[in-house]
Amino acid sequence: MTERAWIASRKGLFELQQQNGRWSLGPIAFLGEPVSMVLADPRDGAVYAALNLGHFGVKLHRKDAGAAQWTEIAAPAYPLKPEDCTDPVDWTVRFIWSLACGGADEPGVIWAGTLPGGLFRSADRGASWTLMHSLWDAPERSEWFGGGYDVPGIHSICVDPRDSRHVLVGISCGGAWVTHDGGASWSLSARGMRASYLPPERGDDQNVQDPHRIVGARDTPDQLWCQHHNGIWRSANFGADWQEVSAAPLSNFGFAVAVHPADGDTAWFAPALADQTRIPTDAALTVTRTTDGGRTFTALRAGLPQQHCYDLVYRHGLAVADDGRTLLMASTTGGVWLSENGGDSWRTISSSMPPVYAVCFQ
């Protein structure tokens, strides 16, 4: 049974607890500090929190199962840039944008995606990190550019539960990349995506796509969903190729997507108006859901604000629990909503949170 969730915000990490069938806000960790990402590891019960402390840099903490306190652990860091290197990118971790667990057969393995576009792997629960030079040194990286930020970043990491060496990452703006050998080598995996923001002759270029978020289904891992800058795409073969979904109502723009863990045909989205506006359509917050692989969608509004609503849901601001029914959504303007019936109706947890970067269930 789902009993806990985490809300990573501009002013700390909030714990959401379920007791006697009712959800309520619990303790706050890192009060006043920006928590950019949170990860709950189902393999050992640990929780990881990434902090972005500006002048003091990026920090990473872990709370072990049953522990009362958080422990600071190593944060991903780039090596010193060689003096003769012509790369214009600053080799400094500016932000931990994604965290993901390795496979069930890889206890202690954690992946981290950062700005400016680096992918790191830890084999010891964050005590040390290794930069995936095979991806960082790819010649194609010179063409990547910023999406939500002024530098490219890795926001999505999908580990194949059938094969821990099979990993796909999503990059804004650098397309999708896949490894079949645990990171020793990488190849582009965004065939079928289209970038309408580029000249037509470059629209199909895999290396300059802007997938806002890529997630997969736990029990049907070949099925991946992508909320792209200008559409929704779906893959039935773990990203080998992608097909555009054209039936989405309201808007095909947005950042967040969540997928039912046991049913890859069911997914939820939080559409918004592009591109400069970035608010819900008609200033009314709506979640859209498909249960048939994107052929049809239902607009879900019950319990969500329908007037004067300017909430934007970030990439990691929408999550579904293992039961496939409980959803948590939070926004840039401090709204937090919970659904226990697959999105059919929502109840407000808070309307006065700090801006929320990420949510997850444990």
Image (cartoon, rainbow, N blue to C red):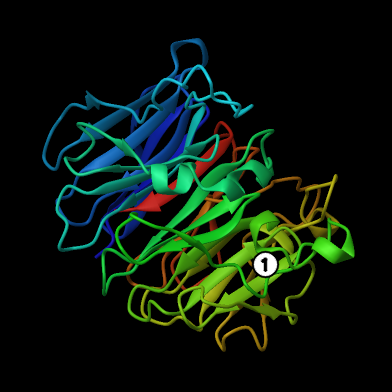
**Can see residue 350?**
no
Residue at the limit of the structure toward the left, as seen here: 66
On the rendered image, what quadrant is the N terminus found in? bottom left
Q: Is residue 128 left or right of residue 357?
A: left
User: Which residue is depicted at the point 28% across and 29% down?
Assistant: 61
Q: Looking at the image, which residue is at 51% across and 76% down?
A: 240
Q: Is residue 142 left or right of residue 220?
A: right
Picture coordinates of residue 144, whole percent (x, y) = 65, 45
Q: Nearer the viewer, residue 73 or 271?
A: 73
- Quickly name the residue at label 1: 301
- Comparing 287 with 219, the one in front is 219
In the picture shown, does residue 59 fall above or below 191? Answer: above
- Amino acid bearing label 1: Arg
Q: Position of residue 204 (x, y in %)?
A: 75, 68
Residue 62 point in image, percent of width and height:
24, 33
Residue 216, placed above or below residue 235: above
What residue is rendered at 45% in x and 75% in y?
A: 238
Q: Is residue 151 left or right of residue 72?
A: right
Q: Is residue 115 above or below residue 221?
A: above
